Amino acid sequence: MPSAPCSEIPIATISGVFLATYSAAGLSQLDFPESQRASRRMVTTNIPLAHARWHRLATRAVQAVVAGREVTELPPLDLTRGTEFQQQVWRALQKIPLGQTRSYREIAEMIGKPNAVRAVGGACGANPIPLLIPCHRVLAANRKIGGFSGGLDRKKSLLEREGVQWRT
DNA sequence: CCACGGTGGTAGA
DNA sequence: TCTACCACCGTGG
C-alpha cells in the first residue's frame, strides 16, 4: 500500500494562479501566485478522487474570496501541521464574517488568552491557508492595516473587495 | 535559554 | 498625531 501522497493542484483566479496542496485529511496549504512554491509547481498526475472533489470546492471558495463574494462551502481543512495554539487562532479566524474585521487583541480574547496578542500575530503569519482562513480580516487595534505575509497590497485589495475601511 | 515578531498601551512632545 | 519605550507570549534556533 503506497502511503497517500499529497496532491498539488493550481487554482486560476483573476488575481493569479494559486497552488493548493491536499493531504489525506483535506486541504493543507494554499500558496500565493508569487510564492516560490506556486511558481515551481509540478503537475500532479493521478489525483485521488477525494482530492479532486475537495479541489472543486477549494477552487470555488478561493475564487469567491478573491472577488469579495461569500464562500458557500469549504473542503475539509487539514490544520494538523500547526501547534495547538496556532490551530486555536486559525479556528477563531474562521469565525470572522465576510466584510468584518477583528483586532489581534480580539482574536487573543476569543481563544481565552487575552495577553497573547503578539503571539496571535505570529500565528496569523503562519497561517497555511490564507484567504479561506481569513487572516486578512485582522487589523491593528487602532484600525490601521497591520501586516500580511502575503504582501500588504494583497491584503488591501482583499479588504477593498469586501468593502472594509481602514486607517491610513 | 535567547531573540524575534502581522501588537497594544502609555507618556511626552 | 507621531515617536519612544516596554510588557506580553508563542516559536524556532
Image (tube, coloured by chain):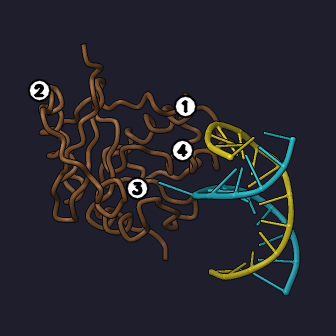
Chain colours: A brown, B cyan, C yellow
Which quadrant, please, contains the N terminus of chain A?
A: top left
Judging depth in this view, the residue of A49 and A89 nearest the camera is A49
Q: How far, Cα to Cα, is label 4 from label 1?
A: 9 Å
Q: Quadrant of residue A159?
A: bottom left
| Residue type, label 2 | Leu
Q: Nearer the viewer, mark 1 or mark 3?
A: 1
Mark 4 or 3: in front is: 4
> Upstream in the sequence, badge 1 or badge 3?
1
Q: Is residue A101 above or below residue A145?
A: above
The x and y percentages for residue A145 are: 48, 66
Q: Quadrant of residue A27?
A: top left
Mark 3: which amino acid? His
1 vs 2, front mark: 2
Q: Secondary structure at mark 3?
A: helix
Tag 4's secondary structure? helix
Labels 4 and 1: the sequence-earlier one: 1
Mark sitting on residue A49: 2
Q: Classify mark 2: residues with Cα within 10 Å, few (<14), some (14-19) or many (20+).
A: few
Horizontal and vertical percent for residue C3? 74, 80
Question: Could you give the CA–CA distance between mark 2 and mark 4, rounded to whole angstroms?
Answer: 32 Å
Q: Nearer the viewer, residue A92 or A125?
A: A125
Q: Is residue A168 above or below residue A106?
A: below
Please give the residue where the numbered disc 4 appears in the rendered image: A123
Q: Chain of mark 2?
A: A
**Residue A11, position as x, y percentages in the image:** 18, 51
